Image (cartoon, helix red, strand yellow):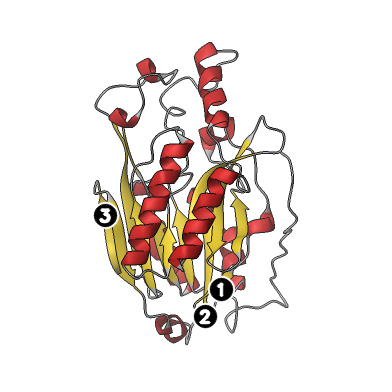
Amino acid sequence: MRIAAVQATPTFLNREGSIEIVLNRISEAAAGGADLVAFPEVFVPGYPIWLDRTNAAAWEDANQQAAYSLYLEQSVEVYGPEFATVVEAVRQAGLFAYVGVVERAASIGSAYCSLVAIDPSEGIVGIHRKLKPTFAERLVWADGDGAGLVAHEHCGVRLTGLNCWENWMPLARAAMYESGSQVHVAAWPGSVGLTEDITRFVAREGRLFVVSVGAIYRSEHVPDDFPLRNALPEGERYHNGGTCVAGPDGEWVIEPVRNEEGIVWADLDIGEVAKQRQNFDPAGHYSRPDVLHLEVNRSRLTSP
């Protein structure tokens, strides 16, 4: 299976511009013969980099309110006409895609950190909403649910995906292993420090391939009219990418890539998964469901 992991910068807080980048990268991935293309966490319209650098929890602060309002305005209606262009691009490309988006909630006043799974034949086959936003992310994203904790099959390969620190959650990982995952996509905002240890650990623990994909954010990517622009220091590098791929033995297929925009390519021999599970299959012969078992509520919550 040929993987195209897109390490890029979105048009920050601009849904239309970010979708255009997604369309171009899907076309590039198809031209390179990819079977799977993966985008970073909330690539459309971008990660809320201001949260940890401003007083984001300030009560009734006009600039914080304006920033949040803009974030909601630029969020994605997954079944809307704009995102339909992404679904059509995937269909024409004939590959499978995981696209990170800020998904607008039904209430209109909240949003989810969502990873959208798109099949070239069936269209949108899954929307995984991040179970627990991390730390300050809880100021902009609502809690997700288990409806997206499923595997999708493409080219005879079982695919799964989680957002960022969900990959550190033992039971979320166990749900992925139990689905029969062979290639797992870990979508990150994008930093080597975030991706390097857990990528190899999940690959070794699950005896599967892990594709960690991250974005690049610098202060110059923040538009001048962003309400909190003056509170963000000039010349700062927020995220440096960190896109990498580990094999089912826990060793690097592609070591973390820093500060370079483009597609990170990897050709995976899926047969290696079965070989590594000869001595350890966490959801199979090395499990004890009579002693330990996992129950997953896969109900979809329609509102936060």
Q: Are marks 2 and 1 in contact (CB under 8 Å)?
A: yes
> At x 47% / y 28%, what residue is drawn?
51
> At x 28% / y 29%, what residue is drawn?
220
**Mark 3 is on which residue type?**
Val
Packing grade of label 1 (10 A; few <14, some 14-19, many >=20) is some
As rendered, which of 26 and 37 lies closer to the eye?
A: 26
Residue 153's tag is 1
Residue tagged 2: 156
Residue tagged 3: 257
> At x 63% / y 48%, what residue is drawn?
79
As rendered, which of 57 and 98 lies closer to the eye?
A: 98
Tell me residue 227's x, y (percent).
45, 17
Label 3: state its secondary structure.
Answer: strand
Structural distance between the alpha carbons of marks 2 and 1: 6 Å
Q: Quadrant of residue 256?
A: bottom left
Packing grade of label 2 (10 A; few <14, some 14-19, many >=20) is few
> At x 46% / y 47%, what residue is drawn?
41
Q: Are marks 1 and 3 in contact (CB under 8 Å)?
A: no
